[in-house]
Image: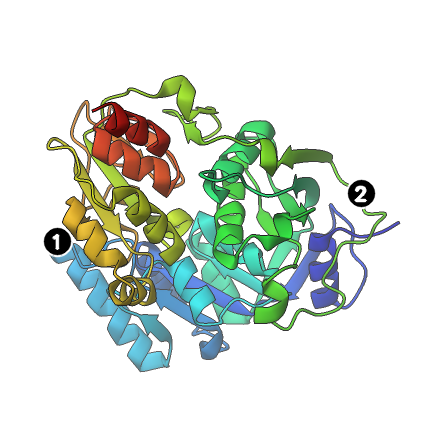
Amino acid sequence: MGQTLAEKILSHKAGRPLRAGELVVVEVDQVMVVDSIAGSFFKRLEYLNATPRYPERVSIVIDHVAPAANLEVAKAQKEIREWGKRLGIRVFDVGRGVCHQVLIEEGLAQPGWIVVGSDSHSTTYGAVGAFGTGMGATDIALAAASGRTWLRVPESVKVVFRGRLPKGVTAKDAALEMVRLLTAEGATYMAVEIHLLDGAEALTRGERMTLANLTVEAGAKVGLVVPSGEILEMYRVPGWLYPDPGATYAKEVEIDLSALTPRVSVPFYVDNVHEVAEVKGKRVDQVFIGTCTNGRIEDLRAAAEVLKGRKVAPWVRLLVVPASSQVLEEAARDGTLLTLLEAGATIGTPGCGPCMGRHMGVLAPGEVCVSTSNRNFRGRMGAPDAEIYLASPRVAAASAVAGYLTLPEELEKEEVHA
């Protein structure tokens, strides 16, 4: 009987064959800590009377509230810098960007590695074939102190994407459709193993990051994209890093990319997914383009393509927060940034921005936001009754111009008839 990709990675690390359901202790290749949990991380290490066993395998990223929003946050971030300097720990400071984007840019997530992070969207590392998973402060501290962690080998769900995305349809639409089909609890503590076939292997690393990122919204422990396409050119992919033909899956789902239309996740659940055409017309107060889901250069370019020669509606705030300093630099070099500014966008410091509702764009009561992020739970970005609609950068940009939820194609129709 063959093994799934999750079973393969954990077996390779353990040095023995493993099956779903078994408990295993494995070496960790990278421990990622975000600013919002760093204080708890330090306290647990102090309680253990321990320091990181392998300092070079630990990274702290100041991204969730960057720059500091108040005095208490500023103190906490000062402690991060001092702690990192004292123990020789890598610290990515304010402005470097969102943890997941930064670690992949820095080569700190590699095919076949195990990367544990103090952020639930650590599943993003599966885009390059790494076993990325989120954990709480205690488990993260133990992983840093010992260099190891324990896991239950997850069952796997096989998701097959076939074909090519039609014009105007994006990986975000594909990811939302995947969550709709799996449902919010359909892959709880499972590995979502993503296969790209019949043209889908052309999806870029960034697009694969979007798919892996959203697997956690179906409850996944890890999201793994089977290496193919440009990943084989960008990384050294081990020959063993593929699922076996006879692997056992808890369930299988297939999605035809060529038949897909733009999608939107409607409040207050990520799996409440509809075609944009079904819900268009909702008046919008704020549009947010960014995050670890859709803050990459291709996302900003997609938004700029829609915004070029157009202006944001007078009552809409368009916030654009690049996922990293590298993304911001590239957007400045190729003219994308100027296009966004000319349309009326406000550019934020690379990082998480208003995604978690701490600063840089918190929503007031009754406001509506179209966001390219990954969660639309009640109170996620501010007021409990504020509404968040999750969509692609193209749909977000078009909605900013129209002032209501819409498609870029609808803007073109209106301009022809004007």
Label placed on residue 70: 1
Please, is residue 397 above or below residue 147 in the view?
Answer: above
Mark 1 and mark 2 lie on one chain; the one further toward the N terminus is 1
Front residue (pair 405, 177):
405
With 110 as the anchor, is 301 left or right in this view?
Answer: left
Residue type, label 2: Thr
Q: Which residue lies under the disc numbered 2?
A: 248
Contact between labelled residues 2 and 1, with CB atoms less than 8 Å apart: no
**Residue drawn at (24%, 29%) of the image:** 415
**Residue drawn at (60%, 31%) of the image:** 186
| Location of residue 357 in the rendering, given as x and y in whole percent from the top left corner | 25, 41
Front residue (pair 349, 46):
349
Report if residue 48 is visible in the image: no
| Location of residue 68 in the rendering, given as x and y in whole percent from the top left corner | 17, 58
Farthest residue to the right: give it.
Answer: 1
Q: Quadrant of residue 298?
A: bottom left
Label 2: which secondary element = loop
Q: Residues within 10 Å of mark 1 (few under 14, many from 20)?
A: few
Q: Is the C terminus in the top left, top right, bottom left or bottom right quadrant?
A: top left
The Cα–Cα distance between marks 1 and 2, rounded to whole angstroms, is 50 Å
**Residue drawn at (29%, 49%) of the image:** 304
Label 1: which secondary element = loop
| Location of residue 246 in the rendering, given as x and y in whole percent from the top left corner | 85, 47
Residue type, label 1: Asn
